[in-house]
Image (cartoon, rainbow, N blue to C red):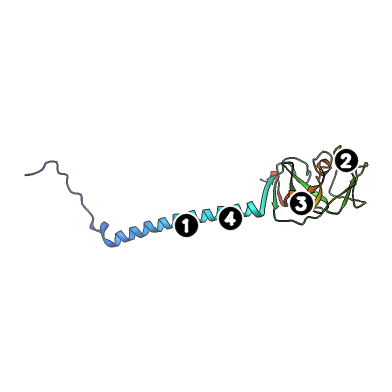
Amino acid sequence: MTCRNRKPKKNINVEEFSPRTVIRERRRELRYKKEIRSFFLRTVILLVSIWILFGMFFGITVMKNDDMSPRISAGDLLFYYRLENRFSAGDVVVFQKSGKEYVGRIVAKGGDKVEITNRSELKVNDGVVLEDDIYYSTPQYDSDVTYPLILSEEEYFILCDYREQAEDSRYFGAVAGEAIKGKVLAVIRRSEL
């Protein structure tokens, strides 16, 4: 009895199924799987590190307007340090007021007496502040802020560099220390990106 539907046998290479070849192939598969696991583990560690670095220590924001012109322009990228808690006059900071984010320069801190005169002068502790790098006058705003203003501890008087139209402490008063998100460390110009 012969079966006509029988298929011819394929030539089987005995070396393909030798123990050495099987072990070699298995090792190659395991090495490949190890490399994939290692890649994903490194990627997760990198992402967690970036999240910790920029979520807790540093912050990034984009300058939304020209309030700090000419030094910082709209569209510039600002890197700031979140853990700074001692600020001094001249520091550029990112702060939040009434749910809105601002960037400004500290001109006075807790215990200082601040006054914006009718002649558009900035006075701190009864002395006129001469600012070589500010190119605009500092007019008073029609607001609820009355001068002279004596700052309590942990309060800061923050002005923008573009003094003639910017929203700053002349508009909403002193800024509490806890409203300051961080001190600006670096600026990347929009034109350099």
Tag on residue 49? 4
Mark 1 residue element: helix
Q: Is residue 30 above or below residue 191?
A: below
Instruction: Check contact, mark 3 vs mark 1: CB within 8 A.
Output: no
Left or right position of 35 against 185: left
Q: Residue at x 14, y 44 (%)?
A: 6
Q: Amino acid at mark 2?
A: Gln
| 4 and 3 marks in contact (CB < 8 Å) | no
The residue indicated by pointer 2 is 140
Q: CA distance from mark 4 to mark 3?
A: 28 Å
Query: How many angstroms separate mark 3 from mark 1 (CA)?
Result: 44 Å
- Which residue carries the number 1 mark? 38
Mark 1 residue type:
Ser
The residue that disc 3 covers is 177
Q: Nearer the viewer, residue 121 or 126?
A: 126
Residue at the outermost bottom position: 20
For numbered disc 3, what is the local secondary structure? helix
- Residue type at mark 4 is Ser
Q: CA distance from mark 2 to mark 3?
A: 23 Å
* C-alpha distance separating marks 2 and 1: 61 Å
Task: Judge the density around disc 3: few (<14), some (14-19), many (≥20) Cα neighbours within 10 Å.
Answer: some
> How far, Cα to Cα, is label 1 from label 4?
16 Å
* Cα distance between the residues tagged 2 and 4: 46 Å
- Left or right of residue 154: residue 45: left
Q: Nearer the viewer, mark 3 or mark 1?
A: 3
Residue 47, placed above or below residue 24: above
Q: From the viewer's perspective, is the residue at label 1 or at label 4 nearer? A: 4
Quarter holding residue 74 = top right
Foreground disc of the pair 2, 1 = 2
The answer to whether the residue labelled 2 contacts the one labelled 4, judged by CB atoms less than 8 Å apart, is: no
Mark toward the viewer: 4 or 3: 3
